[in-house]
Amino acid sequence: MASPLFYALSAIAILCALGVVIARNPMQSVLNLLGSFVALAAIYLLSGFQFLAAAQILVYAGAIMVLFIFVVMLLNLTDREEGQPILMGLFNGRVIGSLAVFAGLAVSGLISTTGNFAAVDASAHGGDLDNMESLAGVLFSKYMLPFEAASLLLLATLVGVMLLAKRERSGSQDGGQA
Amino acid sequence: MKDYNLLWLMPLLPFLGSIVCGALHFATLSARKKNPEVGAGPGALAAPVAILAMVGSFVVAVTAFFKLKGLDAAGRAMGVESSPWHWIDMGPFSVDLSMVVDPLSAIMILVITGIGTLIHIYSSGYIKGDPGFAKFFAYLNLFVAMMLMLVLSSNLVGLFVGWEGVGLCSYLLIGFWYDKGWPAEAGQKAFVVNRIGDACFLIGAFLLIRLFGTLDASDIAAGVAGILENGEQMKDLGLAALLMFGGACGKSAQFPLMVWLPDAMAGPTPVSALIHAATMVTAGVYLIARMNPVYAACPDVLFFIGCVGALTAFIGATSAIRQTDIKKVLAYSTVSQLGYMFLGLSTGVWAAAVFHLVTHAFFKGLLFLGSGSVIHGMHHEQDMYKMGGLRKHMPKTFLTFMVGAAALAGLPLLSGYFSKDEILFLAFGHGGGYIVLWAVGLISAAMTAYYTWRMVALTFFGEERFDVDKVHPHESPTSMTMPLMVLAVLAALGGLLNLPHVLPGYGVMKHWLEPVTDLGTRVFEATGFVESHAGATTEWLLLALGAGVALLFSHLGFRRYLNGPEPDMADARRAPGLTGFLGNAWRLDGIFEIFILIPVRLLSEFISAIVDKLCIDGAVNGVASMAKLIGDDTRKMTTGSVKSYAVWMGVGAAALSLLLIWI
Amino acid sequence: MNVPTEHLLILAAVLFSLGALGFLLRRNLIVILASVELMLNAANLTFLAGARAHSSVGPLNLDGPIFALFVILVAACEAALGLALVIAFYRQKQSVDIEAAAELRG
């Protein structure tokens, strides 16, 4: 019943992802990324992960996207970058080789797992697979240490970003101009 | 008596003194950096600090002695003990360290702190004006702390800590004037030779752990009986005893490890008196007396100890005859006297050895300090050929030195007479192979009397052989003569501590030591070892013989050298081979050189050239050049292009994933 | 939604491959970072697919969502730091072309 919706959303996600890769203009790339994120969030929601869908929209589509767009605008980039058509790059032997490895991986992974999964019961646990109450319970007990570590990571990021983004005032030695 | 924790103070006080003196030394150094003319500076405080620490330690020793004296026989056997410190605890093996004063260690601590205090006072005069004044006292105090640790420890682990500690201090003090060069080498020699003994000690200790499961001295004593009954482990016990004796050989300068002691005379003379005559070198004797039940169980090992002791006594005495350096005479004499102590131990009458240890500490300490006084007065001249006639210039030193010499020579009624004759009597009375040892001992005693009075005659009598215009011998300050006089009294009357069996009031020390020595005596009852068969008549005869030999050879030595060293030259002309042989102490150094040093050096050359340069350096350089070879090719991979790195990373991740999937 | 787990995984694989492709092909640093985000999303999808498969036959499995949550968090940090680096890089090189950074050529 909901399956057609899933396949439609999958198609949107894949097309948008393709757009990210082939768009000449960084702004177009980033906007395609936004589409992919939203489609994924909808898939999460369909799969029964309401909280993560919300987090996906808030953090990815909200915060991270704004950051990307902000940087693109700040640097005022146009499509003056790559000279050769992007798809021509595909014929680079190196890239083809690595893609072959990835494809092989994906295929072998699928072959090794096919049939190992039980049929999915969509109605299990009332269709709410990331019940916020249970999630919080686990997060603050079993995953307490990673949670604390994550807070430290955020703090370190905050400091690091401030340090990186700060314009050097004067007497800089590493060539950065004021 | 348990929990007498004041005992911890005994090693602790000199230890703290050592730290304070060390700090004073550094203070002096920094003061001297600012102002080179400062002289002693804050270091001058070191002598009072160190002496105070010693006096405090001595007071504690005396109180502990009287505490022990107040106990009955059973209580004395247990000793006065501090509460234990759980030092090492690893399952089946644990080490509880406590300080124990039993009759044996009581004697040792009184000797160490008593003579130690005197020598500290003496040093404050002797070492005055030396740039390392405070450093000297820091080392000296540390030595006393370690020596007390050695004798007070309730088990062999603590004893070993002290054992190594005194070895370290000995090394530091022998090389005290390291800037002269040869003292540093002498210190190294002492250290390396002692290492051989210490390795034996350690292996012996490990064997004892295997046999008894403990290193606590009293537990070992209690366990010997069980092993005797069993009989199976007797071989191991004998081996352990032998190895322990090997350790004692190193520390107490017995054949063949005695070569370091004469060289150790490179240190300041008070050091020679304290460490290389009175205390440290007797640690081996103490060790065997402490472990007496183990040795009592192995009569063969005892006889071997006696042989080594007698041989050492003989080598020492013969070598001393041809020395020209006054301190070298005393050093070989010390080697020889230590040999007597081991001979005494081998008769199974442990008290006799301890008695000789104590009297030797008195008279040899006195003689060393006296020689130090002479050297001090002669502006650091040690060659007896360049002395003579000093009795007029330093009367106090002369008189006290005479007392010490008489005691060493074994002139009747002085301390050395009683202690040495006791050992010879026991060896004779024991019969069998010991008769040979007695004969060797008696010959050595004759030579002892001879070389002692030769030394006195050369130093104090005859004409003045030094340049009277340049050298003005002078009497030493009171801080140096006062200890001499105290020691002279002790050296003269020390014999009263343990008079022979045939005299009234005999055997004070022997009875005092009985709680400790009875452990061994009980084992003797089990093995059927009889200490002595001789009766009173034999004892009288031997006493008379000893006195006669001592008097005769003293007279010979004194008369011969009264007019200077010419008889030595005559001997050298007549028998150059023999005199050279004796003068070089049986050429033991040369033998060591040929049989040990040269092979070791050749081996080292081999290892240096083949193993080190070819194999190890080759391997290291090979790895480096391999890295270079590989790097020359692979560095092309470092393209600087982030994307190529990403590709490699992806390939790696893919390979890992494949591994995880397929394996 | 009775979609089999395999289909979710295939979607994740496709998205991941596209992300990897973008990462390797593009030279614009911002697009490269966007591709990384794409790959992280694909990883998240596999976590959730696994959690969904486990939860449908047994007790509620929360490890997957928790991991996804942490991945989102780390992605946020990564994006913030990465973009800060892009700005710093631009300031240095007047460009966001990754080929401009080749100082480490051996």
Image (cartoon, grey):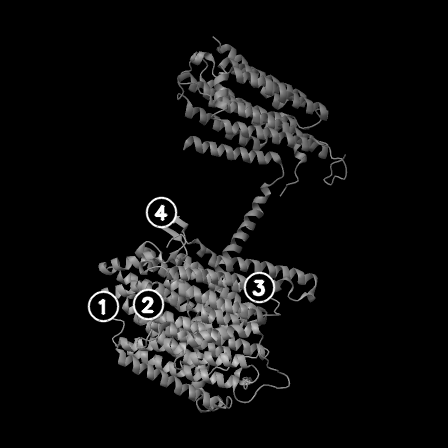
Q: Which residue is mark 1?
A: B528
Q: Which mark is residue A154?
A: none
Single out the mark in the foreground, 4 or 3. 3
Q: Earlier in the sequence, mark 4 or mark 1?
A: 4
The picture places residue B217, in percent across and down from the top left corner, at: 35, 58
Mark 2, other Cα within 10 Å: few <14 / some 14–19 / many ≥20:
some
Real-space Cα distance between discs 2 and 1? 22 Å
Real-space Cα distance between discs 4 and 3? 46 Å
Q: Which residue is mark 4?
A: B91
Q: Amino acid at mark 3?
A: Pro
Quarter of the figure with residue A40: top right
Q: Earlier in the sequence, mark 2 or mark 3?
A: 3
Q: Is residue A2 above or below residue B10?
A: above
Identify the element where label 3 is drawn: helix
Q: Is residue B549 above or below residue B50?
A: below
Q: Earlier in the sequence, mark 3 or mark 1?
A: 3
Q: Which residue is mark 2?
A: B511
Single out the mark in the foreground, 2 or 4. 2
In the picture, which quadrant includes the C terminus of chain B?
Answer: top left
Q: Amino acid at mark 2?
A: His
